[in-house]
Image (cartoon, rainbow, N blue to C red):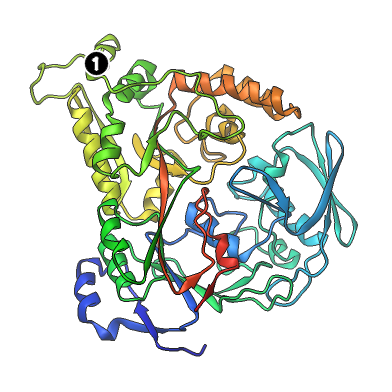
Amino acid sequence: MPYGSRRFLRLSTNSWPLVALCVLGCAGADADLPADFAVIAIENGPVTLDPRFATDATGNQIGELLFDGLTRVDDQGRYHPDLAADWSNPDPVTYEFHLREGFRFSDGTPVRAVDVKATFDSIRDTSSTSPKRSALAPIESIDVPAPLSVRFHLREAFAPFLDLTTLGVMPAARVAAAPAPIREPMGSGPFRLVEFSPDERIVLARAPSELQRSRLAGVVFQVIPDGLVRLLEFKRGRVDVIQNAVDPDSIEWASRLPHAQVLTTPSTNFQYLGLNLREPPLADVRVRRALAHALDTRGLIRSVLRGLATPATGLLPPGHWAYSADGPVYAYDPKRAKALLDEAGYVDPDGDGPRPRFRLSYKTTTVDLRKRIAEVIQQQLARVGVALDIRTYEWGTFYGDIRRGNFQVYSLAWVGVADPDIYFQTCHSSQVPPVGNNRGFFRDAEVDQLTERAQRTPDGEERRRYYVEVQKRVAEQLPVIPLWWPTNVAVVNRRLHGFELRANASLDSLRDAWIE
């Protein structure tokens, strides 16, 4: 691969203590970079890029540039044609998609309906370990009536079905021979994968596609966990985009750089405090409500996030077609928190003394901002007599523990929430680890029934009424504690044109971006 004048750091995760010194003078650590490649700085590398297995935000963001699904969803949760030119729903349990001619995988082979069927079937197979297998359970069978037509037969009416059709499609021959994640998967997107070093960098190059030819020669996702180093690399012109990975205290400084533009937009992301309801204190809803009252979320947003967030009431953001604010809101009230803890039997053993009512372990990543947020939460809970032990981990270890339900307390964000069926995926009792995303092992018969009915209801208004009740019940039971809907922030090099900051934090505008 020819290289030009730009250069950037190749960093290993074992060298972070030395990284600032290298930025200032370790020329030997530099590696060449094509001048017409866009460089995106990211906090953590993805676990996998295989769309059948990718569940973390970074893996899905990069995957949008490598893969095409039958449909693509926008910021408002509306579905648009992608591989499919159109589709029909002749009866409540049948969907037929007609593919557009001209899509090709990065090896030049055309995309056909058999590839769609094989991708879905590889997840549905009983031997599959894909975390998306349970999501595809509503599919009874898939057939291919014509080379560019694929038909899905459902077990019963399933309202959120289109949400499944955003899955990235891969060649039939590859997925049939690989039930486990493929390290270097192939798609039909505008870019192809040329290097996958998840602890260092992921390199994409322009794919030989005539239908959706990229104006960028390539994109490099450079893993830089340290926030200061990310900004220094941006200042030196080695990074083009830092999205949602800029310390709030540094945004004003970055905005003064002559080559920088700062973009902001409200997001559809949802930051929350995850709780393991199998743990004795957290199994009691009074304790969960007490923790919610003990958190001064507005103060945290003001002091740590510099106002770049809005206090959240639940998964769905205001403006979403199914959003409701009918449920209870837990205002900051330490006195109420203490009373609830007393009522639950967790009496403070020494009043305002040092001994806690009980201790909890809080898992987070090594990212500095995440550690600072954890420390503020630790201080706030200490005021009501709850001790929080903060434990930090590299991203892969941390995320693996969360997915397995191996935690007491943690904080993460759901990125790009679109269909309200997210409540089934995160709150239904069938979705506990290892099969689903109900990571805190929440079980509630009413929520189960409501989310199941919503799935079987095609009428939008009736479906919304079910989700209004779901949101109210979940707010009452608090399987997770809502924190905030963050403001998306991107610092962008002015040489990169056409980059747009999406509400769902998608990076798909890189498909149409260019460098001058």
| Vertical relation: 387 (above or below) 396 | above
Left or right: 80, with 424 as reference point? right
Q: Residues within 10 Å of mark 1 (few under 14, many from 20)?
A: some
Residue 16 spot, x, y in % from top left: 25, 66
Amino acid type of the residue tagged 1 in the rendering: Tyr
Say which residue appears at 52% left-offset and 53% top-offset.
502
Say which residue appears at 83% left-offset and 33% top-offset.
92
In this view, the residue farthest toward the left is 353
Q: Is residue 22 visible?
A: yes
Q: Is residue 125 visible?
A: no
Residue 279 spot, x, y in % from top left: 36, 27
| Vertical relation: 411 (above or below) 201 | above
Say which residue appears at 82% left-offset and 52% top-offset.
86
| Vertical relation: 235 (above or below) 487 | below
Which quadrant of the structure image shows residue 226?
bottom left
| Vertical relation: 227 (above or below) 239 | above
Residue 191 or residue 361, whichever sits in front:
191
Which quadrant of the structure image shows residue 211?
bottom right
In this view, the residue farthest toward the top is 343
- Count the labels in the image: 1
Residue 490 or residue 425, whichever sits in front:
490
Which quadrant of the structure image shows residue 29?
bottom left
Residue 375 or residue 353, whichever sits in front:
375
Residue 60 spot, x, y in % from top left: 54, 56
Residue 283 spot, x, y in % from top left: 39, 21
Left or right: 71, with 445 as reference point? right
What residue did someone put label 1 on? 346
- Say what secondary structure mark 1 lies in: loop
